[in-house]
Image (tube, rainbow, N blue to C red):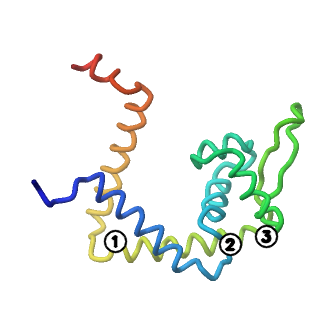
Amino acid sequence: MTTTPTIGFLLHDVARLLRKRFEQRAKGLGLTRSQWQTLAYLANNEGIHQAGLAEILEIEPITLVRILDKLAERGLVERRQHPTDRRIWLLYMREEAKPLLVDMRSIGDAARGEALDGVSAEDRERLSEILTLMKSNLIQACRLGAGDKEKNHG
């Protein structure tokens, strides 16, 4: 039996440790991990409806509602009714959230800097290319479903 961790375990551990380091640095912001993740994804998807954001975050819609309630109480996000469907709420950042996003980006940059200490610029670029390709491959494989790839290529 080999003791060398697989790429999957390494990726999982690195992602977990990056989140942990970010959380250590972000403690002073007064946000939970789920709140800062919601803000980060909302910043790139303003105007999205709640169900769409829940899908992106891979959480249940009711869980997202609770997170959004807390963020709305703090004045960081707002819900606006859809112009043609009153059952749908669209989500937007408030101006009050923008300084927090700047802080979050700075904290994220610092945590990534710690993680990549000693890694050359060329290796960083190559790592990014490889991870992007892996992500693309897995997105495509997931679209095919389990076993479809074997039927088509096996």
Residue 135, percent across and down?
A: 39, 44
Q: Which mark is residue 100?
A: 2
Measure the C-alpha gap from mark 2 to mark 1. 24 Å
The quadrant in which residue 103 appears is bottom right
Taking the view exactly as shown, the residue that stands out farthest to the left is 1
Kind of residue sitting beneath label 1: Leu
- Residue displayed at 65% across by 57% down: 38
Report the label total. Answer: 3
- Residue displayed at 33% across by 23% down: 147
- Pointer 3 residue: 96
Query: Contact (CB < 8 A) between labels 2 and 3?
Result: yes
Taking the view exactly as shown, the residue that stands out farthest to the bottom is 28
Image height check: is 54 above or below 83?
below
Measure the C-alpha gap from mark 3 to mark 1. 31 Å
- Which circle's residue, 2 or 1, is located before the other in the chain? 2
Residue 11, percent across and down?
A: 33, 57
